[in-house]
């Protein structure tokens, strides 16, 4: 059985390193369409570039206040997140880490000092930065990883995405994350609802003996065929980005299973594939959702009503 990564009230916070790949859009596989970054990002909110792009698929955000909170404390803190939507736009982002007294980690002088010395940043800096990025990007995938706070940034993206999905459905029930719980055996699935550039994400994760034993992430077309088998797409992307779906997709799946086999393993430990940056971050974000589902034993398929745009 996998050891708990978090214990209520007691734990040591682990800061994991994530190697970032190229910063530009990845997956430029098809010469007759926009880059696949729009698919890989799977943004479920309209981006700041919406003025130059027409939304052709994906649910609007419903007005309301949406909340998410971690159930368990890690190193004395747990994440709480509140997102407000007004007139279909995210107007407030209140992500924080609080202790049992409800006090913010941004006010913990000793913690901030120690983390700053080790990582070059601290909660007082990166928490407001993540909230600000989310408001500007209007999407989880538009939030960039803060150097020195990789693990926290990836968690933020995951939770922001879950809140966006709730807002699309208009579901204001608080999302509870049973962080650190042992993974329950079963098969967990996530899929994007809409096709972009002819493909959408399908992701299946198998847990056996409390460990992730299989990861099947892929992009599939309307005929159920994998992007890995699209010869033209692979050739074009390889020429432009130095990698292609038939290379980076198996790599991400393999690295995820390997990472989760380690003590305190996390999807955030999966390294970004150079040349497939957006797809890598999308993979990590979706993998985290599946892990959260497995912590609760919820095998209901997660459907992502991903926004698709065209110019």
Image: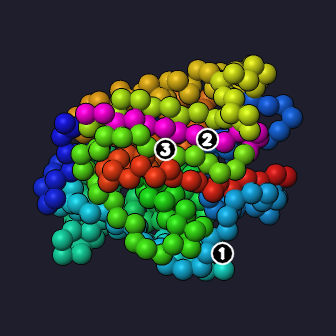
Q: Residue at x 41, y 40 (%)?
A: 187
Is residue 124 something one can see in this rendering? no
Is residue 176 something one can see in this rendering? yes
The Cα–Cα distance between marks 1 and 2, rounded to whole angstroms, is 25 Å
Whole-percent x and y of residue 164? 55, 64
Q: Which mark is residue 79?
A: none
Front residue of this view, candidates 196 and 235: 196
Q: Residue furthest left?
A: 10
- Look at mark 1 in the image and give the residue it sits on: 88
Whole-percent x and y of residue 251? 50, 24
Q: Using the image, determine if residue 279 lies above or below residue 298.
A: above
Q: Residue at x 52, y 46 (%)?
A: 190
Q: Please check the rendered image and state whether residue 200 is part of the magenta-colored stretch, yes or no.
A: yes
Whole-percent x and y of residue 204? 49, 38
Q: Which residues are magenta?
A: 196-209
Q: Which mark is residue 201?
A: 2
Give left or right: position of 310 versus 16: right
Q: Residue at x 65, y 51 (%)?
A: 193
Q: Please check the rendered image and state whether residue 129 is part of the magenta-colored stretch, yes or no.
A: no
Q: Using the image, determine if residue 123 lies above or below residue 19.
A: below
- Look at mark 3 in the image and give the residue it sits on: 189
Q: Quadrant of residue 211?
A: top left
The Cα–Cα distance between marks 3 and 2, rounded to whole angstroms, is 11 Å
Whole-percent x and y of residue 248? 56, 25
Circle 3/circle 1 CB separation < 8 Å:
no
User: Which secondary structure dominates the residues rendered in magenta?
Assistant: strand
Q: Give whichever of discs 3 and 1 has the lower sequence position.
A: 1
């Amino acid at each position: 059985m996998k050891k708990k990564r978090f214990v209520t009230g007691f734990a040591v916070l682990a800061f994991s390193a994530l190697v970032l790949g190229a910063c530009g859009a990845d997956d430029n596989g098809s010469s007759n369409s926009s880059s696949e970054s729009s698919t890989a990002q799977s943004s479920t909110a309209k981006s700041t570039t919406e003025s130059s792009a027409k939304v052709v698929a994906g649910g609007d955000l419903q007005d309301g206040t949406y909340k998410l909170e971690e159930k368990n404390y890690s190193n004395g803190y747990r994440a709480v997140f509140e997102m407000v939507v007004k007139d279909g736009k995210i107007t407030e982002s209140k992500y924080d880490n609080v202790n049992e007294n409800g006090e913010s980690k941004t006010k913990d002088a000793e913690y901030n000092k120690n983390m700053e010395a080790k990582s070059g940043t601290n909660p007082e800096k990166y928490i407001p930065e993540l909230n600000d990025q989310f408001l500007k990007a209007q999407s989880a995938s538009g939030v960039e990883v803060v150097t020195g706070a990789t693990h926290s940034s990836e968690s933020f993206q995951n939770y922001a995405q879950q809140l966006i999905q709730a807002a699309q459905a208009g579901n204001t029930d608080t999302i509870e994350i049973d962080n650190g719980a042992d993974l329950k055996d079963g098969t967990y699935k996530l899929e994007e609802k809409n096709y972009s550039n002819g493909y959408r994400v399908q992701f299946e994760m198998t847990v056996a003996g409390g460990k992730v034993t299989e990861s099947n992430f892929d992009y599939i077309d309307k005929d159920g065929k994998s992007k890995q088998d699209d010869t033209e797409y692979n050739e074009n992307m390889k020429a432009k980005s130095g990698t292609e779906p038939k290379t980076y997709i198996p790599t991400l799946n393999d690295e995820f299973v390997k990472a989760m086999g380690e003590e305190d393993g996390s999807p955030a430990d999966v390294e970004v594939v150079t040349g497939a940056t957006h797809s890598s971050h999308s993979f990590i974000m979706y993998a985290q959702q599946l892990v959260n589902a497995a912590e609760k034993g919820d095998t209901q398929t997660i459907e992502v009503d991903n926004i698709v745009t065209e110019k």
